[in-house]
Image (tube, helix red, strand yellow):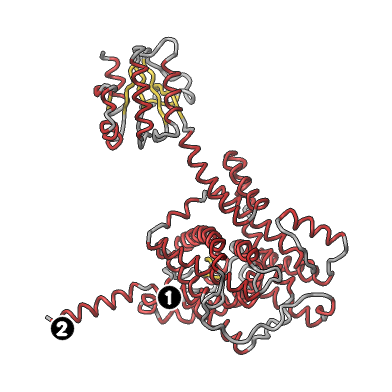
Amino acid sequence: MGAGGRRDRGGRVVSSLRAVPGVRAVTTYRREWLSKDLVAGVVLTTLLVPQGMAYAELAGLPAITGLYTSILCLLGYAVCGPSQVLVLGPDSSLGPMIAATVLPLVAADGDPDRAVALASMLSLMVAGIMILASTARLGYVAELISKPTMIGYMNGLAVTILVGQLPKLLGFKVDADGLIDECVSVAEGLADGKAVGAAVAVGCGGIVLILALQRWLPRVPAVLVMVVSAIGAVVVFDLEDRGVSLVGVLPEGFPPLTVPDVRLDDLGPLLAGALGIAVVSLADTISNASAFASRTGQEVRGNQEMAGVGAANLAAGFFQGFPVSTSGSRTAVAERAGARTQLTGVVGAGLIVLMLVVVPGLFRHLPQPALAAVVITASLSLADVPGTVRLWRQRRIEFLLCLAAFLGVALVGVLEGIAVAVGLSVLNVFRRVWWPYEAVLGRVEGLPGYHDVSSYPDAERIPGLVIYRFDAPLIFANAKTFRDEVTRLSRADPVPEWIVVAAEPMTDVDTTAADVLEALDESLNSRGVHLVFAELKDPVRRKIERYELTRTIDERHFFPTVEAAVAAFRSR
């Protein structure tokens, strides 16, 4: 008996361990995958290093922190992430949000150590939010941002990133706050002749080279080719003496486990930024996971993905890193290179560590304009101009939502922009409930059922009977709209005897709407008009009975179908 109990406990321990995605991946790993994962890891590293450094500077942090972040987030996700192919790391869409959160809290002298500590605490907060959301199964939060508002947000982010990188691309610095101010400062710098010709040549040449390779030779690692070419140009043409800023020698070795030291009054602003970053990271992760899972036949587990991203941010936060998300471009590179499991990311992390320990000066001649070129080309991929044009052609109201989200990011700010995007998405849902589609129905020859008379003007309408459809739940926000339309229909000439509500779209009736219904029915009855319901769902019917509306609305005026209501009217 005791032995059986011990085996049972042991079995439960083994089962719990196998529930960890990383452990499950090890126990089910196939030997034939090894060579593919190793090769994909090497290929992936060529993208991880320059992008990690570039996105760290985009976030207002030292370039080395991008490499620390890349290492730890890859290892953290390999242990806790459910996807076999997703690649996490510093992200162009999060960089401006990190900068918008951290830089205002940094002292006027721009202390880089304080900036790193704040960014690391931000990463830990994002991790906490993700893990709590995963535990509470709140994956649906990503759906708070509709596609039109997300397109607008990303378009605004793309423009903000591009303009913010122009000074580095042109070889000079500006002191500006906000998109408009930055545009003015860049224009003034150009007018004053501050642009460095060699920097412009390296930066613009880098952009052209990346875009050309991505367009015509997509299998070639475009970023790596550009970085190597830029380093070669610096060495051959001695561009440092021509005013081109370089990355310099990176710190040697690996950072120790560090608990970020921040002030108590920093926690509030950091939490606000962490919430916005978590929402964007979650939406990005779910969309990328869905896209790549559909190719490989895997199942998307949103709550586990949140836990995996949370673990990645947790690992990065304790080793001088900053918040991360999934990367569609890096995942695509790994997939094209033959990646089969998260061992690809582990190999990439290991190679970065090897570089920092053995050859920290490998990128000392990397020009800053080349990093700006990496960021700018990444920002171009964020923008969705065809999607914006499609919204303009297909649905103007959603185009306006897209435009409002764009302006929110461009004019108000990156963090404020995500709040604008979420708010607009929620308001759009509320607008559809507040002003739902309404229709009067009639019978159309040759078509079964009853149809909208605005679409079929010749539809037959029965004298004395109006069939009215209200395409929304009946709640406090739209009850008066319903009342006003029914009242208008009841005052038609000739006056109808019955107004049949085709209630199939009504998924709810709240207490405010119930009070409005009661007053409406009494008003109609006083004028000899009866309010009749057809196709009312059983749960909604039970609510009406619980509200005691049947005191005024005759119980005989509830019908299972519109046809039954019409038949009852004709047989009176």
Using the image, tell me which numbered label, if any, was put on residue 3: 2
Q: Which of these two is toward me, 169 or 413? A: 413
* Residue that sits furthest to the top in the current view: 494
* Residue that sits furthest to the front in the current view: 264
Q: Is residue 482 left or right of residue 168?
A: left
Q: For the C terminus, give its image quadrant.
A: top left
Q: For the N terminus, give its image quadrant.
A: bottom left
* Residue that sits furthest to the bottom in the current view: 358
Compared to residue 474, the image places residue 528 above or below, namely above
Is residue 220 visible in the rendered image? The answer is no
Quarter of the image where one finds residue 562 = top left
Dot 1 alpha-carbon crowd within 10 angstroms: few under 14, some 14 to 19, many 20 or more: many
Dot 2 alpha-carbon crowd within 10 angstroms: few under 14, some 14 to 19, many 20 or more: few
Q: Which of these two is toward me, 275 or 15? A: 275
Using the image, tell me which numbered label, if any, was put on residue 221: none
> Where does label 1 land, which residue?
79
Chain-order first, disc 1 or disc 2: 2
Where is residue 23? Give x, y as percent. Answer: 37, 77
- Tag 2, which secondary structure? helix
Q: Which of these two is toward me, 447 or 403? A: 403
Where is residue 405? Give x, y as percent. Answer: 60, 48
Where is residue 52? Give x, y as percent. Answer: 61, 73
Is residue 66 visible in the rendered image? The answer is yes
The residue at 60%/43% (across/down) is 399
Where is residue 303? Give x, y as percent. Answer: 40, 62
